[in-house]
Amino acid sequence: MRAEEQESLFHRWLHDHIGLMLKVVRSSTETPQDREDLFQEVLVQLWSSIANFRGDAKETTWIYRVSFNTALAWRRGERRRRVRHAEFLKYDTTAKVQMGSTDVPAQHEMIDKLYGAIRQLPQVDSSLAIMHLDGLSYQEMAEVLGISENYIGVKLNRIRKQLSEKLQGVSDEL
């Protein structure tokens, strides 16, 4: 693949699928700083993987797989990073995100609680929850994770129960 084609494809993927990358990042991180770091890592891995994309799978399947695998590797190293950067995390100098006039704080709180509950799940379950919220079919989820469609259904039922328990007061609002 030529450099121009790779750059064009990367920019199109970024434009068309930034939402799914951000969902994976948000489900794998707790702080804004970690989200920024992981998002940058996902972009680097996506760029590096373009040469391996043959078009056998859907683009979204490929992007999910790269994003989830990057997030999984990132989470493994999270404990090591947290110890090294503990002092810096005490002093949050990052500007607070301004909410738009159409944003409702209660909705943000519910979404934050949902993502917090999803982060508490094992990585595969977290990945399934995000793909389910994104409306992927069982077949698409099976392609991304390399497990059977039947097992996807079983796992999703268990995940729904777990999230329901974690979000007892909030789940009715979702």
Image: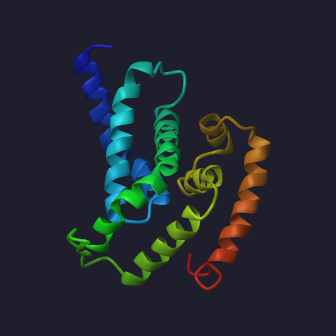
Count of numbered circles on the image: 0
Screen quadrant of the C terminus = bottom right
Q: Residue at x 38, y 65 (%)?
A: 31
Image coordinates of residue 68 in percent, x first then y, are 51, 44
Q: Residue at x 54, y 27 (%)?
A: 57
Image coordinates of residue 67 in percent, x first then y, are 46, 42
Q: Residue at x 57, y 52 (%)?
A: 135
Would residue 116 appear left or right of 160 to someone viewing this image?
left
Image: 69 above or below 48: below
Image coordinates of residue 15 in percent, x first then y, are 30, 42
Image: 85 above or below 153: below
Image coordinates of residue 19 in percent, x first then y, are 39, 51
Instruction: Farthest residue to the top: give it.
Output: 1
- Could you say which is closer to the camera, residue 59 or residue 124? 124
Image: 6 above or below 20: above
Q: Residue at x 62, y 51 (%)?
A: 128
